Image: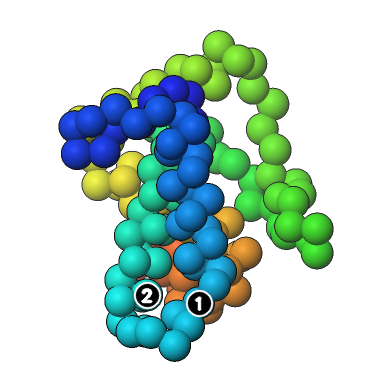
Amino acid sequence: MAGPSKTKGKEVSRPEARRRLHEAVDRILDGPGDGDPDLWVRQVLVDIGLVVRAAAPALDYEVGCVIYGVDRPRGHFPLNLSWKGAGINVSSQQASQWTASGGAARGDLPPLEIQQQALAVLLHPVAEISCHRWLHDLANALDALRFGGR
């Protein structure tokens, strides 16, 4: 995270945001325990939102790449969980432009085609590492829309 985050209009310090994120990951990994499984599921979904919010600069960067027309190679995830073969050579200035463009797109939505392509780009690595077939199918379907598929 680049600085303080906000929760319902209040700024949260970086250490506090980090502590909340660590607690969220702990809840996700600990599982439902003997309590209310539905309560755990609801909290995990909120916690996933915290993880996504913490990853906002990376997501903005990827969306900015799409807006600028840059296609990231798909790459693959070997056993060490690194994203091999997907790198893009980019200057810090260009990366800042992509991140700013992606961040602006959160408030000023780009055309649906760009949104679909950006969602596909974001979902492909998540689907690959999560091993959920339906996420693969969704990412592929979003890609297919770009090429006139259904």
Q: Nearer the viewer, residue 70 or 3?
A: 3
Judged left or right of residue 96, residue 114 is: left
- Is disc 1 placed on a helix, strand or loop? loop
Q: Nearer the viewer, residue 33 or 130?
A: 33
User: Contact, CB < 8 Å: mark 1 with mark 2?
Assistant: yes
Residue 24 drawn above or below residue 56: below
Q: Residue at x 60, y 15 (%)?
A: 92
Q: CA distance from mark 1 to mark 2?
A: 7 Å
Q: Is residue 123 visible?
A: yes
Q: Residue at x 50, y 18 (%)?
A: 96
Q: Nearer the viewer, residue 12 or 92?
A: 12
Furthest residue toward front: 34
Q: Position of residue 34 (x, y in %)?
A: 44, 88
* Residue wearing tag 2: 40
Residue type at numbered disc 2? Trp
Q: Residue at x 74, y 51 (%)?
A: 82
Classed neighbour count for the residue bearing mark 1: other residues with Cα under 10 Å, few (<14), some (14–19), many (≥20): few
Residue type at numbered disc 1? Gly
- Is disc 2 placed on a helix, strand or loop? helix
Classed neighbour count for the residue bearing mark 2: other residues with Cα under 10 Å, few (<14), some (14–19), many (≥20): some
Furthest residue toward bottom: 34
* Residue wearing tag 1: 31
Earlier residue among tags 1 and 2: 1
Q: Which quadrant holds residue 17? A: top left
Q: Position of residue 103 (x, y in %)?
A: 35, 29
Residue 89 drawn above or below residue 132: above
